[in-house]
Amino acid sequence: VTGAFADQTGPHLRKAREKRPIGTLFVITYYAGIVLRWVAVIMVIPALVSALSGEWSVVPDFLIGAGVALVGGSTLVLLCRTAPSRVYWSQGMLTVAVSWLLSMIVCAVPSWLSGHYLSFVDACFDVMSGFTTTGLVLIQDLDHVSDGLNTWRHLLSYLGGQGMIVLALSFLAHGFPGLYTLYVGEGKDERLLPSMWRTARAIWFISVVYLLVGTGAFAVATRQAGLSAYRGLLHAFWLFMSAWSTGGFAPQSQSILFYHSRIVEAVALVVFVLGSLNFGLHYAVWSGNRREVTRNLEIRSFLVTSAILTLISLAALKVSGVYSTGEVLFRKGVFHLLSAHTTTGFMTIYPSMLVVSWPALAMFCVVLAQLLGGSASSTAGGFKGVRVGIAAKTVVHELRRLLLPESAVVVTRFHFFRDHVLGDRQARAALLVIFLYTVTVSVTAVANLAAGYPLQESLFEAASVTGNVGLTAGLTSASMPLGLKLHYILVMWSGRLEFMAVLVLVGYLIHRRRLPQ
Amino acid sequence: VPGSRRDTLPPAQAAKNVRRKGTASRTDWRRTAVGSITGMATEAASVILYLIGLAVVSLVVAHL
């Protein structure tokens, strides 16, 4: 068979068919369906906690939610019937972007049924805030929320931090093609082991071991703070999930301030700093490579930026006379700076105090820390330490190139799990994401200003929502305009997925027939 | 591979190898457990040291 006829029946046409938008829709639908089924399974956990706490009126909320997720997921899978044989990069990115949106809607069902939200959009806002480990909330009467709903909120944060889609597909669709594309789509790119399934299993193992140890530490701390054994254990479970995922959700409206406990604050600090570290670093240290802690570019970048910002903000707080003793400076100043830098969002002061009492310089340091963020391939948001490190190295590299003779060969090296030579591609990728974050913060700040909020609070909240931090200057509330709520949902979503998956989705919607591979 | 040691192993030796394989698996688990504990201790100690450093900085700033 030769000529045009060969082209119509051969592998070229099959490949072309796979690239067509209908093929992409098929892939998205199939895997989004699997993710929704997984969501249904997860809803059993808060239902069980509700049953254990004797909250029988709450259990149906989760059963209804699980039913919706199961029916929706199974329908999507049945529409496709068979698993796709291949997943392209763009299809993986699209699957992540769409799965997060669909999961948000389904996961909001039990939250909305609880009656703690003024509208379904508010429930979606909180779910997206949990998934993206942001921590901003629109929930009403948080201090009287059921144990089941509190478990659900913190569980969303915990699962979102680990990489929801990859975990779901690792365990429910073992051996499916293109898992790595979803891993990257969810903002993680450090492959710990050759197989993605084993990488997901390693991440899960590290998180569960820390869950057991961290919950124990929090349980001791909350017991010491005066909670009963059962309440203390529940609070410990919730606080660990929130701190480890750098989420910032708390079971009480006063966040960590509620406990008035040095030990709770100390445990929270240790856990959320650990949670903001790269899973690759955890794996390296657990495998015996302890030198990675001191050599890793990301750790060095975090140490330098957090130390400088802490020093400036402490000096500003001391000079302004807000806090005078060393202990209070640490418990308020250092705690908030690190809470911002690790993109956690726990607070030990009231949001209004940030605006009223804190000097502008200290607030600016917190805004910068929110943008810099934690580590890549971790639960944290923001620019990420490795990109900040690469950007700094690029500046030094260019300066050296300008200062040295033209014939000199300038080589800049850095260590990030292995030795790298700084190249144009790495510098471009890091600077592109930093640029996209900066643009998004600016657009969000403009949106806040347009809604009538003051400049300082607008900038603070814009950095918080874009960096998936969760600290608030008081802007985020159920009374904010609907358009701004929707804008925040989009920003949290795109910030968490590091823009690429969202940009691919926008490109797909605009140029359906020219899908990039 | 024909003629190799594996190809010519007597059944008793093969059974012993299976038992050794089980022992290796247990060794892997032990190694994983020890690695997890020492890894966690290393990470926690590093973070606590860093926090102590920041606490000292706070005390110094408070007394300036």
Image (spheres, rainbow, N blue to C red):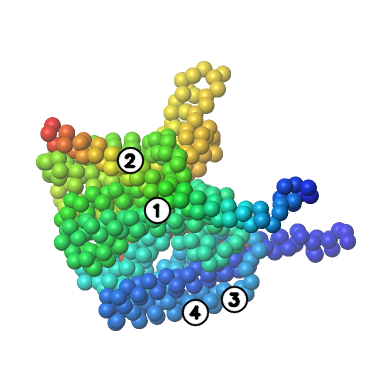
Whether residues under marks 1 and 3 lie with C-beta atoms below 8 angstroms apart, the answer is no
What residue type is disc 4 on? Val
Front-most of residues A114 and A167: A167
Choose the circle earlier in sequence order: 4 or 3.
Answer: 4
Q: Which residue is mark 4?
A: A71
What's the CA distance linking mark 2 and mark 3? 51 Å
Label 4 SS: helix
**Pointers 4 and 3 in contact (CB under 8 A)?**
no
Quadrant where the C terminus of chain A sits is: bottom right
How many C-alpha atoms fall within 10 Å of the one at disc 2: few (<14), some, or many (≥20)? some
Left or right of residue A176, residue A192 in this image? left
Closest to the observer, A207 or A34: A207
Disc 2 and disc 3 in contact, CB within 8 angstroms: no
Residue A442 at x, y percent in the picture: 36, 49
Chain letter for mark 3, please: A
Is A59 situated above or below A382?
below
Q: Is residue A349 above or below residue A40?
A: above
On residue A379, the disc is 1
Position of the N terminus of chain A, as image quadrant, is bottom right
Left or right: where does residue A83 sit relative to residue A101? Answer: right
Q: What residue is disc 3 on?
A: A79
Q: CA distance from mark 4 to mark 2?
A: 47 Å
- Which residue is the site of mark 2? B46
Q: CA distance from mark 1 to mark 3?
A: 33 Å
Q: Residue at x 75, y 59 (%)?
A: A12
Q: CA distance from mark 4 to mark 3?
A: 12 Å
